């Protein structure tokens, strides 16, 4: 090979190396853009964007009876409501002062003193709920009168009976979606968003938040938002829930033979809003390890939203499977009142929503949002329970993955 040929070969080799370097750099820049786009996008979007068009806040006054509170939950298809009281008379949930002021005058009108959930109400009903069974000697309508008495107490009397009731959260409307996900990834299920916010730190440990109006933001709202923006996060959402570490392996379950009453009491004591129902014999321990057992269905507090209050007590002594069967047939069953117009059964009542460890996070988010369920049970090919992916888990792994990508990007920039 002569000198000219060697020069030409060297030029060709250098050109090929240059093209290869350009391709690598383009891919690197594209990867940087994708990472920066996902993280920057979640930082730029604010929680006010998610609640701007939401309906007015559903709330109840502190003087409302439990019967009225249940009616408000059922009519509005929600599972929790904040409780409002006159200002200056109560200590707020967690020591905070979440106030609503008059839009025109600025005068404080309300103080939100806590949150009441459907589980709080059910637990109150279930407390000694079987006390009057068999009390027919005194009155044939003893159980009904007992339920009427229990439901006539003011809602303020049961605030604080659960951790969630004491955890009334508020987020500034300018909070980023990413920071909101941090709060929700720690198990906070909902937060109040003031439409116009004025925050005072008069006392270091006390937050005073005043607003002419609030909207409720829930974990489900954020999950639905992520589903709609699937393309922005496809690099994260394409991974399986197993890869991302989204599966919770500690699963408290109940046997299909367990009474509704005992199930509700145990759920409240353990701070659980739902439990899987498994094929297992009854046990002295109501909550049992469900891993590796055959999954039958889900029992959650929202299962009872469509059941009239007057019929709840008769259902407490049923097994969870018997109750779910009656609830699913309530349109034709004489023992269960027909649903109200426009009122659909809870999606968790209609059918069981599950996934496998290999299901993508995108698939899990779509299933949760489409079916409006707050968790997917993870099962193997034989239908045996392996774990659970909750909304909390979904938000946690998305946020962690986005922040990890951002840190990797910063490392790349610093080193090159």
Image (spheres, rainbow, N blue to C red):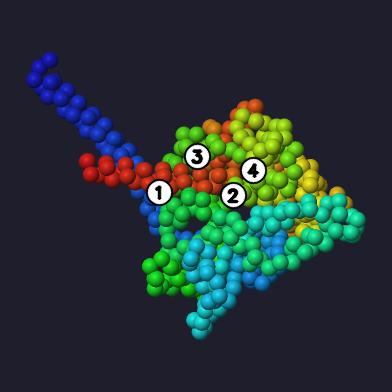
The percent position of residue 179, horizontal first and vertical second, equals 42, 55
Is label 3 in a helix, a strand or a loop? loop
The percent position of residue 408, horizontal first and vertical second, equals 32, 42
Residue 153: mark: none
Is label 2 in a helix, a strand or a loop? loop
**Disc 1 to disc 2, C-alpha distance:** 34 Å
Q: Which residue is mark 2?
A: 271
| Residue 344 in the figure: left or right of residue 184 | right
Q: Give the crowd class for mark 3: few <14, some 14-19, many >=20 residues within 10 Å.
A: many
**Disc 2 to disc 4, C-alpha distance:** 11 Å
Q: Give the crowd class for mark 2: few <14, some 14-19, many >=20 residues within 10 Å.
A: few
Q: Earlier in the sequence, mark 1 or mark 4?
A: 1
Depth-wise, is mark 3 or mark 2 nearer the camera?
A: 2
Depth-wise, is mark 1 or mark 2 nearer the camera?
A: 2
Q: Which residue is mark 4?
A: 275
The one nearer the camera, 405 or 148, is 148
Depth-wise, is mark 3 or mark 1 nearer the camera?
A: 3
Depth-wise, is mark 1 or mark 4 nearer the camera?
A: 4
The percent position of residue 22, horizontal first and vertical second, equals 26, 37
Is label 1 in a helix, a strand or a loop? helix
Using the rendered image of the protein, determine whether residue 311 is visible from the camera's viewpoint: yes
**Disc 4 to disc 3, C-alpha distance:** 18 Å
Q: Which residue is mark 1?
A: 38
């Amino acid at each position: 090979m002569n000198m000219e040929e060697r020069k030409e070969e060297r030029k060709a080799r250098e050109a090929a190396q240059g093209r290869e370097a350009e391709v690598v750099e383009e891919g690197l820049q594209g990867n940087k853009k994708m990472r920066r786009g996902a993280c920057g996008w979640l930082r730029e979007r604010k929680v006010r964007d998610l609640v701007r068009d939401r309906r007015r806040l559903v709330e109840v006054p502190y003087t409302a009876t439990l019967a009225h509170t249940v009616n408000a939950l059922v009519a509005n298809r929600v599972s929790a409501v904040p409780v409002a009281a006159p200002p200056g008379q109560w200590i707020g949930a967690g020591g905070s002062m979440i106030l609503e002021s008059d839009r025109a005058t600025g005068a404080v009108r309300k103080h939100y003193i806590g949150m009441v959930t459907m589980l709080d109400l059910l637990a109150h009903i279930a407390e000694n709920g079987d006390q009057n069974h068999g009390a027919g000697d005194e009155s044939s309508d003893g159980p009904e009168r007992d339920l009427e008495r229990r439901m006539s107490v003011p809602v303020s009397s049961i605030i604080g009976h659960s951790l969630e009731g004491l955890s009334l959260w508020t987020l500034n409307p300018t909070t980023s979606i990413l920071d909101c996900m941090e709060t929700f990834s720690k198990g906070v299920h909902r937060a109040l968003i003031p439409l116009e916010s004025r925050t005072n730190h008069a006392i270091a440990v006390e937050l005073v938040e005043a607003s002419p109006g609030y909207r409720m933001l829930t974990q489900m709202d954020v999950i639905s938002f992520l589903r709609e923006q699937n393309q922005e996060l496809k690099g994260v959402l394409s991974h399986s829930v197993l890869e991302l570490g989204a599966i919770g392996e500690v699963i408290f379950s109940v046997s299909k033979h367990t009474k509704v009453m005992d199930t509700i009491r145990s759920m409240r004591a353990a701070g659980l809003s739902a439990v899987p129902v498994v094929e297992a014999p009854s046990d002295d321990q109501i909550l049992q390890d469900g891993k590796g057992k055959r999954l039958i269905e889900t029992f959650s507090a929202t299962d009872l939203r469509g059941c009239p209050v007057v019929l709840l007590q008769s259902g407490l002594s049923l097994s969870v499977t018997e109750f779910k069967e009656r609830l699913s047939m309530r349109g034709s069953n004489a023992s269960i009142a027909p649903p109200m117009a426009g009122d659909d059964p809870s999606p968790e009542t209609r059918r069981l929503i599950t996934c496998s460890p290999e299901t993508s996070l995108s698939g899990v988010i779509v299933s949760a949002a489409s079916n409006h369920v707050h968790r997917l049970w993870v099962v193997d090919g034989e239908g045996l329970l392996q774990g659970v992916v909750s909304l909390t888990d979904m938000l946690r792994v998305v946020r962690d993955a986005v922040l990890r990508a951002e840190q990797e990007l910063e490392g790349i920039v610093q080193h090159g």
